[in-house]
Image (cartoon, coloured by chain):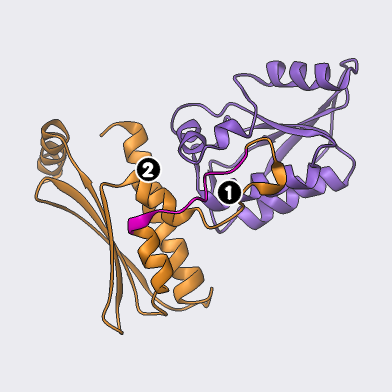
Chain colours: A orange, B purple
Amino acid sequence: MDPVDAYRVELCAVEAVTNAIRHAYGNRAGDEVSVTVCIRDNKLEVEVADTGLAMLAAQVSQLSTGSDVFEFDARDRASLPIGGMGLQIMRESMDEVSYQSDGKVNRLLLSKRLSDQELDSVKNNVGARD
Amino acid sequence: MRFEQTMVGDVLVAKVLDSRIVADVAPRFKHQLIGYITGGNRSIVLDMRAVSFIDSSGLGALVSSLKVIGRDGDLVLCGTGGTVASMFKLTRMDKVFRMFSTTEEAVAALTLDSGVSVEQAPLSN
């Protein structure tokens, strides 16, 4: 995978885990955030799950509609964002971002299409470890 | 967070020695940067050569520091190549922070801004 794409996948996973710790668990220690990575249907999928508070509806809809957090005036330092960037980073970096909550487990699914070359590379690396 | 500081004339060059600036260290990162500013530094070069990963928390700490400086100075970056630079581009922060390849270029730009002479003096941490 291209180093910039790989960075962005890692970045999205980090942002999602940070959001779960901060917002689902309110920075409380001792709770679990699980991260599952798999290749499915020519896509790299990263699922970040928690059992804390679910995301607000407005935040969930932001995943599909986007936000204007990066539409700032670069010359006006007072207008620059210092937070609220994570969801928009995920939206702009991944091909698909979805969120589901069944009242017990909250699951954020990040998905990125892989090229044939990237898929071959993954298979070869897995084969090399067997 | 670990830093190494050097004064070059009136410009503070702060080299970040850690490779990852993410949520768990971002508050300390911000505290250190704001400490430089409240300590009287108005021209700061942040050497990011050792940084291989920064998330939105780290970016937020940088932006917070820029807000504290306001119009009365500047915080510029150097050594933000490759993937780290892509993070600034993704968030449009490449339009906000001046970025240079080397500390020398960054110091020269800030020195030109403030019109001061350059004389290097290492600082103890």
- Locate residue A65, reporting x and y percent: 36, 56
Q: Nearer the viewer, residue A108 or B25?
A: A108
> Residue B16 location, x and y as percent?
64, 38
Q: Which residue is mark 1?
A: B58
Q: Residues within 10 Å of mark 1 (few under 14, many from 20)?
A: many
Q: State the residue at coordinates (29%, 31%).
A: A2
Marks 2 and 1: same chain? no
Q: Which residue is located at x 15 percent, y 35 percent?
A: A115
Snapshot quadrant of residue B123: top right
Disc 2 crowd rating (10 Å Cα; few below 14, some 14-19, many 20+) is many
Instruction: Assess whether mark 1 and mark 2 are in contact (beta carbons under 8 angstroms).
Output: no
Q: Which residue is mark 2?
A: A8
Which element type, helix, strand or loop, lies under badge 2?
helix
* Chain ID, mark 2: A
User: Along the line of sight, which residue is nearer the eye, A101 or A33?
Assistant: A101
Q: Is A42 placed left or right of B100 in the picture?
A: left
Residue B20 is situated, as x and y percent measured from the top left of the image, at 52, 45
Which range is magenta?
Answer: A64-73
Q: Would you say residue A87 is visible in this rendering?
A: yes
Residue A32: within the magenta? no
User: Tag 1, which secondary structure?
Assistant: helix
Residue positioned 37% across, 51% down in the render: A90
Instruction: Tell me the kind of residue under disc 2.
Output: Arg
Corner quadrant of residue B17: top right
User: Distance between the Cα atoms at labels 2 and 1?
Assistant: 15 Å
Task: Say whether residue A68 is magenta.
Answer: yes
Give the numbered dot on residue A87.
Answer: none
Task: State the predominant SS element of the stretch in magenta.
Answer: loop
B111 left or right of A119 in image = right
Observer-nearest residue: B60 or B123?
A: B60
How far across and how far down the image is residue A121, in percent? Answer: 15, 34
